[in-house]
Amino acid sequence: MDASTPRSTAPVDDDAPLDPRDALALLDAEHTRTQRQLVPDLRLLYGVWGAAWLVGFLALWSSATGRGPLVLPAAVAGTTFALLLGAAVVVTGVHSARRLAGVRGTSSTQGAMYGWAWLLGFGCVASLIAAAAGAGASAEVMGVLGPALSGLVVGLLYLAGGAMWQDRAQYSLGVWILVASAVGAVAGYPTDLLVMSLLGGGGFLVAAVVVALRGRSA
Amino acid sequence: MTTDEVALPDLDPVIHAPARLRLMASLAALDDGDRIAFPRLQALQDLTAGNLGAHLRKLEDAGYVAVEKTHRGRTPATYVSLTRRGRQALEDHTAALRALLAPVTARASRSQAQEG
């Protein structure tokens, strides 16, 4: 083994002068490539959350109504829902941590503050739901509160993220999730579960496709 | 036709080598006020630690990058960022490359802009 063998992706001679056209192309490609590597891939995140909402909420709705493709015992449906959302949380956390690793400064402070906003928001949702149950809320009220409060937090945080990073697709997703949550709440339990599955989960999947198409044209 | 024989802009030899050009472009992709850890930069650039260190030293000597040695707990950590001078040098270099490629069109549009 020759230790001085150049790495496969490196040019043979690191100090060879470049043709101006090649140099400009290299500058552009490297800039774009690095920018993409340092932010989470939203196609992946939206795709994972879209699948989790679509299947998870559909399982809850099916088991509550006895209709649809995923009629499961209530406990199994609840566990499926929890596992799917838990998996989405883990994928989001691991992927984001990897992409943001090793960068310090303004953008990492911004990212950390935004990450904490999700944690604090859902901590608050959990305590509100527990408080409502403690105050004697009926199963119907609980069935409306859970999805609606979660959708409210998700929608508002995507509005904030879209505004902060000047990302129109993310802002639109926030608007869409808020609309889906409001429509679901008005429809009442258990129809709200179907609304969150199709409009909410479907909205995430559409957003994933929009981001993928945007990336290809850029 | 002496007007076409304008002096071609000089290309900065510190930047105009493939590895350092890539490195500068990569560092310029960081937001202003951000710095990147040496191992992450090494992974992004797919260079050996020795190679990356040598290129960074040349860029640091020119005042284009800032290399900050710090500690995270007990382990030493090195963070790299583009200096304001480095960002300016890269912009000048990009402009020089564009001028080399299209001297005629660049001058034509400039004179058009002056007329308009």
Image: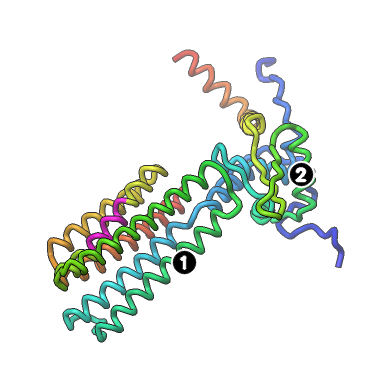
Residue A149 inside the magenta-drawn segment = yes
Q: CA distance from mark 2 to mark 1?
A: 36 Å
Q: Is residue A156 above or below residue B58?
A: below
SS assignment for the magenta stretch, majority: helix
Residue at (44% x, 50% y) in the render: A217
Residue A47 coordinates in the image, percent (x, y)? 39, 64
- Residue A68, picture quadrant: bottom left
Q: Is residue A114 left or right of residue A18?
A: left
Residue stretch rendered in magenta on the structure:
A147-156
Q: Few, some or many C-alpha atoms within 10 Å of disc 1 (few <14, some 14-19, many ≥20)?
A: some
Q: Is residue A178 left or right of residue B40?
A: left
Q: Is residue B29 above or below residue A55?
A: above
Q: Is residue A165 above or below residue A177?
A: above
Give the chain letter at badge 2: B
- Residue A71, picture quadrant: bottom left
User: Circle 2 is placed at which residue position?
Assistant: B55
**Residue type of the residue flagged with mark 1:** Val
Task: Establish whether labels 2 and 1 are both on one chain.
Answer: no
Residue at (66% x, 52% y) in the render: B72
Give the chain letter at badge 1: A
Residue B36 inside the magenta-drawn segment = no
The residue lying furthest to the front in this view is A135
**Residue type of the residue flagged with mark 2:** His
Of residues A17 and A145, which is closer to you in this image?
Answer: A145
Residue A168 coordinates in the image, percent (x, y)? 35, 46
Residue at (18% x, 83% y) in the render: A66
Of residues B93 and B73, which is closer to you in this image?
Answer: B73
User: Circle 1 is placed at which residue position?
Assistant: A91
